[in-house]
Image (cartoon, helix red, strand yellow):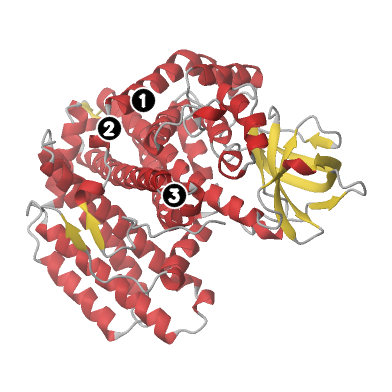
Amino acid sequence: MEKVKTYQSQSFFTNDITIDDIFTIEDFTDEHQMIAQTTAEYIEQEIKPVLPEMEKQNFSEVKKLIRKAGDLGLLGTDIPEDYGGIALDKISSIVITEIMATSRSFSITYSGQVGIGSLPIVYYGTEMQKADYLPHVASGEKIGAYALTEPNAGTDALSIKTTARLSKDGRYYILNGEKQFITNSSFADFFILYAKIDGDKFTAFIVDRDTEGITIGPEEQKMGLKGSSTTSIVLNDVHVPVENVLGEIGKGHSIAFNILNIGRHKISATCLGTAKRALELATQHATERTQFKRPLSEFNLIKEKIALMAVKIFAMESMVYRTAGEFERGAVYSKQNRLSFVNLLKIFAPECSANKVFASEALDEIVDESLQIHGGYGFTSEYEIETLYRDSRINRIFEGTNEINRIVIANAILNEIDGYPSARTINGTLSGRFSCEWSQLNLLRELTFFLVQHVKETIPNYSKEQELLACISDFAINIFALESSLLRIEKMLVKGHVKNLVHYEAIVKVLAEEISGVFFKKAISLSTNVPSSFKQKLLELMDFLQNKTFDSMSEKRKIAEVIFKGSY
């Protein structure tokens, strides 16, 4: 495999960062706006009219909708033009994913098609495999699915039991085993499927649906996402041509983990789109619903809920598109240096996991509060928020549970880089309007640094101390959220995007306060197991916050009032 030349990521692991290199939604081009509009119109005109039937597990329209998406170019953003795609930038792919979230269950079908169900071929396929499958994926003529999970191997993917053995004539691998919870399975035309050759060589295969010996199980009766297909697959002496081995024999784990990184990032974009919809529904209901002769929107507890939803969405949006920009920078770098982009994917793993954890957990809080604002109506299936509430829960399980993603982040900090930087150099002009928040962020980073150093220096077998690892991960995730939001608003000032600046300034300041609360809660639970340097830094943070003059309660009310007026 080709070696990756030096690539400087702008992730939260690097010491230096440049404001101009951070991508935000304010940097959207006309092309990004156009693809967003095309996606939104497709959902409104084609998908929403048939969603009720689809969510009764009537999938007759799904293939038609996929074909229509192909006609609009929505399936080929990540596929090279040589293979029928349109090869847009990495940001466009995330724009579509975010907007597609409003199609509810169909967004899962779509993601299976353009993401984990076909990207393994894009990045690891032979020329023949790409030519045979990708044009049909881009057009929607063939639908892909990803078959990794098994009854006894979910998060522990490397423990799969599905086997593959070479036939006597050397022309086929004969697969036996069972896969579970496979999205798109009832109507997929092919599967990216993992098995162990000779019981130990973890390998990926492209398996066509019409191959003899494949049995598709009944639909799972899921809590949510009822409009998507999820079944088991049983393989009984399935003969897969040797030319359908994907990537290198025994290197299937590289495909699985790299593709899951992309999947985690796209899940965060889906969470973002769903969160925006939940806020929209909450705002609409609070404005229209009257209690005690006043609309709900006039009650301060409702205002606080709306404000905190908006704060979390701003952070999610800042993180997701910052990472999308990183993917695009990596893709451009790879092209300029004649490298395969896939060789950079591991670099982005911690960011993808951070986005996935933060976005999925923030979404659950947002849909919960939106349902609460709806009151009893939210508990009935007539109201859309009830569907979003059920659908959102799976995101903390999809593409690796949030627990395993926390371990991924902590291991990256402890094992894969030289410590964790206690400070950061920001290249670019800072406004001075957020000096308190930058100072606060530096204190949070120093707290994390002392904890990381303590774990590395005093706990030889720290991999077993999962509570500590989760704490390190939570610290890093929240630092990434606050840093991304601060960088975004500083860039807004630099670039002159000052419309409603006071509104967004309040959002970032409230976010800094909320994240400090997360740190305090976590840090206090560690107080007897950390060095004095950590405790001292925690006291500094406490003193710093006590001396702040920011009126969080009033600012939350103002944030909500702007949202209710629809003027942000």
Q: Is residue 168 visible?
A: yes
Secondary element at tag 3: helix
The residue that disc 3 covers is 356
- Circle 2/circle 1 CB separation < 8 Å: yes
Badge 1: few (under 14), some or many (20 or more) residues near its Cα, within 10 Å?
many
Q: Which mark is residue 36?
A: 1
- Quadrant of res 131: top right
Q: CA distance from mark 3 to mark 2?
A: 22 Å
Instruction: Name the residue nearer the viewer: 126 or 399.
Output: 126
Q: Position of residue 427 (x, y in %)?
A: 17, 57
Tell me if residue 356 comes above or below residue 448 in the rendering.
above
Q: CA distance from mark 2 to mark 1?
A: 10 Å
Taking 165 as reference, is 373 left or right? left
Q: Is residue 220 visible?
A: no
Tell me if residue 179 comes above or below residue 156 in the rendering.
above
Considering every residue shown, the one lying at the far right of the view is: 168
Secondary element at tag 1: helix
Q: Which image quarter holds the C terminus?
A: top left
Q: Position of residue 386 (x, y in %)?
A: 47, 32
Q: Amino acid at mark 2?
A: Phe
Q: Which image quarter holds the N terminus?
A: bottom right
Badge 2: few (under 14), some or many (20 or more) residues near its Cα, within 10 Å?
some
Q: Amino acid at mark 1?
A: Ala
Q: CA distance from mark 1 to mark 3?
A: 22 Å
Q: Which residue shows up at 25% across the image and 67% down it?
A: 444
Comparing labels 3 and 2, the label whose residue is closer to the camera: 2
